[in-house]
Amino acid sequence: MKRYLNVICSMVFILFLYLPGLAMAGKITGTVKVNGLRSPVDILVYLVKAPPVQEDLSKTKFIMDQQNLTFNPHILPIPVGASVDFPNNDKVDHNIFSLSRTKKFNLGSYKPGDSKAVLFDKPGIVELRCDVHAEMAAYIMVLKNPYFSVTDDQGRFEIPDSKHLEQNGIKGIKNLPAGNYVLKIWHEKLKTQKQMVTIPENGDVSVEITATRGTPGVLYK
Amino acid sequence: MFMKKMNLLIGFFLILGVCTVLFFEKPGSARARLISTHDRIIQGQVISEYGPVENARVRVAGTETFVLTDRQGNFKLSTKSLTGNKFWITAGKEGWFNNAQVAPPSGRMNDIFLYPIFFNDQPDYRFISPVTCSRCHVKLTRYWDQSKMAHTTSNPKVLDIYYGRDAFQNKNVAPGYRLDNPDKEGNCVACHAPSVAAAGSWTKDLETALWSARTEWDGISCDFCHKVRNVISDKTRPSGKRPVLERQTATKGSSIMVFGPYDDVVVPPMGASYSSIYDKGRFCSSCHGHFEPLEKGKTWNHSKVYSDSEWKGFGLKDNTILPVQTTYQEWKHWQDQLSAKDPNKGKKCQDCHMSWRKEMLPYDNHVVDGGARNMWGTYRSPKNIRPHHFDGGTKTQLKTALSMELEGKTNGNKLNINVYITNTNGGHWVPTGETMRSVMLVINAVNSNGKSLKMLKGEQLPGWAGKGKVDAGNYAGLPGAVFAKVLQDDNGNLNVPFWRATSIATDTRIRPKTTVTLSYEFALKDPEDEPTVEAKLIYRPVMRPLAKSKKWSVDDILITSNVW
């Protein structure tokens, strides 16, 4: 009986040794190459499905800034349940609104120096517009999981993008466990692209996605 | 000894007195003013040769807040200032020329003297050329000259429609107003060449107007709009509204008399007068509407096309008048419905069609510009400047005006698609104005092999969306929808010009801030297949049949597209 107990104990011990290893499996890094766009910047790369994570959204501080008749950033991915601040750092009044079915709101006209916040509680695309400045447009992408990234000016991305998440007040998003994932991209001038990615038991995986100009699709079909 | 003690006591009380005075000194009083950047109080009076002027708007030139004078013409302004700063304090009131006085660093300022405008409109007045305006208002004039506003008379499409010609100047190409009415000149000049129309009769031949000596520019020029002191109702006009002009050289020396939204413009070349109409949507109403009375005894049935509330919004009482264009009324009806708390309440034409664009930045370039910069320019916040670009029907404007979303579901052998089209930011119905404009929704559903799916339920695009190759923009018969106002004549012909129209067949244009939901059903042979649906929203400035007969090359504008 004691022998069995020893065996079970050692097995449990070995399992415990493996658990952190399993949780630390890997990241998806890579680049997006585009045809027909000046720069591969501001492309959203996200996982359609991912293992559930517990995230603390109480301290998030996502910011969509307004300056010189432009929204900054142009594309802001957030997890469902996060709120976004809209400060006006311009010299003229702005009136941000969205009539997207994901989230409808109208912040009204407000002065330089003021700020307002909106909570996003449904996944989907929110197209932001300014009532008085026709050129102003930006997108808030409300995603089902925190495994997303936006490409830099070289087209590079990293999932999970822990640096971006931590900057915006979300901590503790760990690497993805080994397995198969569906990676998707979204940009307002690119065709939606799907790619299967396999994360091995140990280490990261690197992918390359080629995208072409076209009409984007919905986030989740 | 006693004297010494007395001196000490007096000295002590003196110091105490000074300390007390300094302690209770309030900021803003004379002493504090000299040494701080605190609020400075400026007091004065606005007078005229008839006595004090009540309700004049007084402000520090270029700032955003103003005060009104009381019955004695007195005002009290407070402003942040640095010690010793000199200010221009300006006063303006409707019916008076603006004027100003310097507020000296200390003491009471001199009275601001206002001169009244004696209404004495001179119909033979010659409007000043925009070239003159451009010497100081360089950027404003340049943006205006690039706008449609500056070329309303020489617009080739307008002339082709008026004379019944095509793009190659071939004659007798219908439709043509003068082809149908050879002995009538029509009322086009009322809005297409207003400076000529204002000189007398507004029924005139268009080209006569174009080559008239009175046309200093071929469109709606600076001096014309800035000679308007009000807009009033006038049922004899095509728009039902008329600008009230005041054409005269100013009594103040030789400066040009102009009306505008500023009460703080006091510069020698202009005799400027404040008018509140420049900041109201009503200003645009004198042209952005078109009502045509039907032939005597004829009526049409509006109840199939418009709701009672919409019909009331047009301001029409009976069915003897055809609302051809109703842009101003559409906006007004929308605004009147909104509650006072609605963030859209108070949005007016000027907010979108005279707003800042990115290529105009930095703001400072525009705030004081051109020759005015070194002479009299007043620095003002970009918030209070309206760039005169008059954008409308451009790609950027349309993208903001309409948005589209798709929703789909496969259900066995069927694919259901919902399309939601929203008038996100148009303050009027979209498309508006000319009835030759349309917005089309074109849907293409394919299976995973790229083969088109058969539509089971849903609307199709009508014949006038263009018959022929799809690649060339002919969409007749495809799944989709069209948003337009369709005029009809007695013989049932659709999309006829307004002078032939006797009724409105349909008006599917999208109302402000409302969403139109369209449902489509497609047949799916293989339920396991993954179909794709692409929806395009396209703006077409001129309907296909008209563009074809006139041989105009008009490009469609893709507003937005979406894939499910």
Image (spheres, coloured by chain):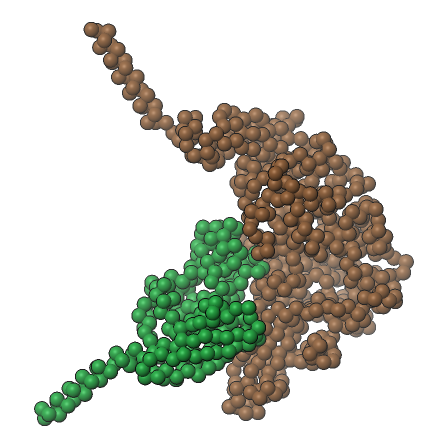
Chain colours: A green, B brown
Residue at image position (48%, 50%) is A112
Residue occupying the point 66% across, 26% down:
B49
Residue B363 visible? The answer is: yes
- Residue in the picture at 49% in, 26% down: B106
Is residue A217 visible in the rendered image? The answer is: no
In the rendered image, which quarter is residue A85 located in? bottom left
* A65 lies left or right of B337: left
User: x, y percentage for residue B390?
Assistant: 66, 55
The count of marks equals 0
Q: Nearer the viewer, residue B554 or B192?
A: B554
Tell me: B75 left or right of A15: right
Q: Residue B399 appears at what percent x and percent y?
A: 60, 65
Q: Residue furthest right?
A: B183
Instruction: Quadrant for residue B522, please give it.
Output: bottom right
Residue situated in front as seen by the camera: B430 or B355: B355
Find residue B167 and report its horizontal and vertical position in percent. Answer: 81, 66
- In the displayed orientation, state which residue is furthest to the left: A2
Q: Quadrant of the N terminus of chain A?
A: bottom left
- Which residue lies at the image location 79% right of the left edge and 65% below the top edge? B497
Quadrant for residue B176, please give it: bottom right
Residue A82, above or below A87: below
Q: Relative to the observer, which residue lies in front, B248 or A40? A: A40
Q: Is residue A169 above or below residue B10?
A: below
Q: Position of residue A31 (x, y in %)?
A: 45, 75
> Is B467 above or below relative to B149?
below
